[in-house]
């Protein structure tokens, strides 16, 4: 089920899981563990989708005159999720 989700859908569900966990005393221990496990699965799914998108993003780099080559798009590392 989660694999077929878009990045945006997974992110919304992750935010919902985090909100449930932030309720603290409103959840039983089992409910907290379930929300945490769901959050971990969704985090991994989002990371996989971001990694796949990063591989697809390329920029054109002019080599000589009107010749171009593709190069990976590079961003500064903002740390692990």
Image (tube, rainbow, N blue to C red):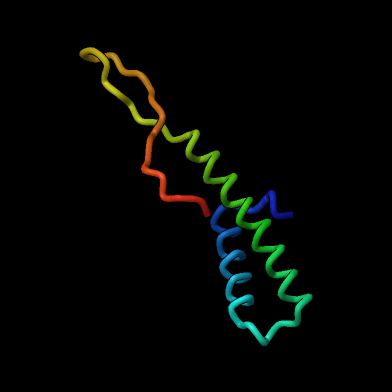
Residue pictured at 57% horizontal, 48% vertical: 47
Residue pictured at 74% horizontal, 54% vertical: 1
Residue closer to the observer: 36 or 48: 36
Looking at the image, the residue that sits furthest to the left is 65
Residue 22: x %, y % from top left = 58, 78
Looking at the image, the residue that sits furthest to the right is 30
**Left or right: 34, with 8 as reference point:** right
Looking at the picture, does residue 25 appear above or below residue 4? below
The image quadrant of residue 52 is top right
Looking at the picture, does residue 70 appear above or below residue 31? above
Looking at the picture, does residue 53 appear above or below residue 62? below
Q: How many marks?
A: 0
**Left or right: 60, with 4 as reference point:** left
Residue pictured at 69% horizontal, 49% vertical: 3
Residue closer to the observer: 22 or 56: 22
Residue pictured at 30% horizontal, 24% vertical: 61
Residue 15: x %, y % from top left = 56, 68
**Left or right: 63, with 56 as reference point:** left
The image quadrant of residue 37 is bottom right
Looking at the picture, does residue 28 appear above or below residue 68? below
Residue 5: x %, y % from top left = 64, 53
Residue 8: x %, y % from top left = 54, 57
**Left or right: 38, with 50 as reference point:** right
């Amino acid at each position: 089920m989660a694999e077929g989700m878009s990045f945006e859908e997974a992110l919304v569900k992750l935010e919902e899981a985090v909100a449930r966990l932030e309720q603290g005393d409103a959840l039983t221990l089992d409910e907290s563990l379930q929300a945490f496990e769901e959050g971990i699965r969704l985090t991994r799914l989002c990371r996989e989708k971001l990694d796949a998108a990063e591989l697809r993003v390329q920029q054109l780099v002019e080599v000589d005159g009107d010749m171009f080559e593709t190069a990976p798009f590079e961003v500064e590392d903002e740390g692990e999720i």
